[in-house]
Image: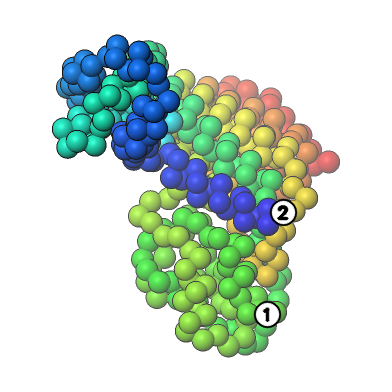
């Protein structure tokens, strides 16, 4: 049951971050206001209803509709320009993270929604859906929308100071990576059992073909187990973030399966054109690493941003190592998946930076200190992976041609021994 709630929450957040949902709610507001107005009109006294004429409401609605159309168009242009700048200065992958920014979505949805509400109310009135005596109630709803627009304008002005900056891109990527990693730490493999080289597979297996080509984004582990016949087990060779081709084998199901059962199992996989963060925690680390690599490119040459990205990577990996699994973590024991191990996370986070920043002592020294700190995280898998990677990073620094005095500074940062 808990696994099902987690899946519902994950899917809800995916649609919650879609601006279209908010605009739809505003459009429904105009319809609701029309339907509720007769009831509200009956509850209001005659003296109250006589104070406002509907022509006054129409004047406000007309002003709101015309102004919100211009503001919405202008704000969308600002958002597109800011996101293009972020993609150029940070990494193109950060663009999709910024699109999920709830502040930007709420503000733009308020502007577009206010336009839709006012235009819809004007059309509904001229079609005769509004009672002329319901002007007071319509004015109250309109005033509430105007107040919401003013608050959204103030939020938008404040938000514009950071929109599209490298700092905002870095913070957004860090928060998204942290969210994905902590979710995976609390619920390892999202409820599935670990698949490794030591896993003994049964002799009779039925291959599960991919229903389409694309990036595997989500796996509904609980529903996947429910689709399996009694005592059957599924062994997946792919994980969220993998690119698969139509007809490629996603995994194998123990026993002999019919086409209907295989189709039902395949329906529990969500495919798309891009990697997403919900179940692909490795992707968040890759985005942060790309920001650092972009900053270290000759065209930008900004080691300060690379150092900030390193500190962000260190903080999210430390938080991941300190998080304990939930009591109900193993909710789908008959589903076996090979999710990333700590060594995979260390590789995704630091491999590109160790290569691209090896010739810059400030970056190499920060990386060495970050690895030394992570080696004391207390998690055996993470600490061992970090110590092994530290030796590799030192080789990069030596091959990059750093002078001996710089290499001595790196060696002076001692890596903690295995506990």
- Kindly state the secondary structure of the residue where label 2 is placed: loop
**Image vertical order of residue 93 relative to residue 33, above or below:** below
Q: CA distance from mark 1 to mark 2?
A: 21 Å
Which residue appears at 49% of the width and 26% of the height? 171
Give percent across and percent down for residue 367. Answer: 58, 30
Which residue appears at 75% of the width and 43% of the height? 324
Q: Residues within 10 Å of mark 2 (few under 14, many from 20)?
A: many
Who is closer to the viewer here, 280 or 360?
Answer: 280
Who is closer to the viewer here, 375 or 119?
Answer: 119
Who is closer to the viewer here, 35 or 390?
Answer: 35
Residue that carries the numbered disc 2 in the rendered image: 329
Among the 4 quarters of the image, the one containing residue 33: top left
Reading the chain from its start, which is encountered first: label 1 or label 2? 1
Q: Residues within 10 Å of mark 1 (few under 14, many from 20)?
A: few
Give percent across and percent down for residue 71. Answer: 23, 21
**Image vertical order of residue 198 relative to residue 96, above or below:** below
Tell me, yes or no, if residue 39 can be seen here.
yes
Give percent across and percent down for residue 354. Answer: 52, 37
Taking the image as shown, residue 368 lies to the left or right of residue 292, namely right
Taking the image as shown, residue 181 lies to the left or right of residue 382, namely left
Protein image colouring: rainbow
Who is closer to the viewer here, 82 or 314?
Answer: 82
Residue that carries the numbered disc 1 in the rendered image: 230
The total of numbered circles placed on residues is 2
Among the 4 quarters of the image, the one containing residue 135: top left
Quarter that holds the C terminus: top right
- Kindly state the secondary structure of the residue where label 1 is placed: loop
Outermost residue on the right side: it is 419
Q: Nearer the viewer, mark 1 or mark 2?
A: 1
Numbered label attached to residue 363: none
Q: Are marks 1 and 2 in contact (CB under 8 Å)?
A: no
């Amino acid at each position: 049951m808990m696994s099902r709630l987690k899946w519902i929450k994950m899917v809800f957040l995916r649609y919650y971050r879609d601006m279209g949902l908010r605009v739809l709610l505003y459009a429904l507001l105009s319809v609701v206001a029309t339907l509720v107005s007769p009831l509200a009109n009956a509850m209001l006294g005659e003296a109250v209803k006589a104070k406002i004429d509907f022509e006054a409401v129409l004047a406000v609605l007309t002003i709101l509709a015309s102004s919100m159309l211009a503001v919405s168009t202008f704000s969308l242009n600002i958002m597109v320009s800011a996101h293009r700048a972020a993609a150029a200065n940070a990494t193109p992958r950060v663009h999709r993270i910024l699109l999920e920014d709830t502040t930007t979505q709420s503000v733009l949805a308020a502007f577009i929604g206010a336009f839709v509400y006012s235009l819809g109310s004007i059309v509904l009135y001229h079609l005769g859906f509004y009672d002329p005596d319901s002007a007071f109630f319509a004015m109250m709803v309109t005033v509430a929308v105007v107040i919401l627009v003013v608050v959204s304008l103030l939020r938008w002005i404040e938000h514009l100071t950071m929109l599209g900056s490298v700092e905002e891109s870095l913070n957004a990527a860090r928060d998204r990576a942290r969210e994905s990693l902590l979710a995976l730490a609390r619920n390892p493999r999202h409820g599935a059992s670990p698949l490794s080289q030591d896993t003994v597979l049964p002799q009779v297996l039925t291959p599960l073909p991919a229903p389409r080509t694309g990036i595997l984004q989500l796996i509904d582990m609980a529903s996947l187990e429910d689709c399996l016949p009694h005592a059957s087990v599924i062994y997946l060779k792919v994980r969220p973030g993998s690119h698969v081709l139509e007809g490629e084998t996603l995994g194998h199901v123990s026993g002999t399966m019919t086409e209907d059962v295989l189709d039902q199992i395949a329906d529990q996989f969500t495919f798309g054109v891009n990697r997403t963060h919900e179940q692909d925690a490795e992707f968040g680390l890759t985005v942060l690493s790309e920001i650092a690599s972009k900053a270290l490119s000759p065209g930008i040459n900004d080691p300060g941003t690379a150092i900030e990205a390193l500190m962000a990577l260190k903080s999210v990996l430390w938080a991941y190592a300190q998080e304990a699994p939930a009591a109900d973590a193993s909710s789908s024991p008959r589903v076996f998946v090979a999710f990333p191990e700590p060594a995979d996370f260390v590789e995704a986070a630091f491999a590109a930076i160790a290569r691209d920043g090896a010739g810059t002592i400030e970056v190499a020294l920060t990386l060495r200190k970050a690895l030394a700190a992570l080696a004391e995280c207390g998690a055996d898998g993470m600490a061992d992976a970090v110590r092994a990677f530290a030796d590799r990073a030192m080789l990069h620094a030596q091959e990059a041609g750093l002078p001996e005095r710089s290499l001595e500074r790196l060696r002076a940062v001692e890596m903690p021994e295995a506990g």
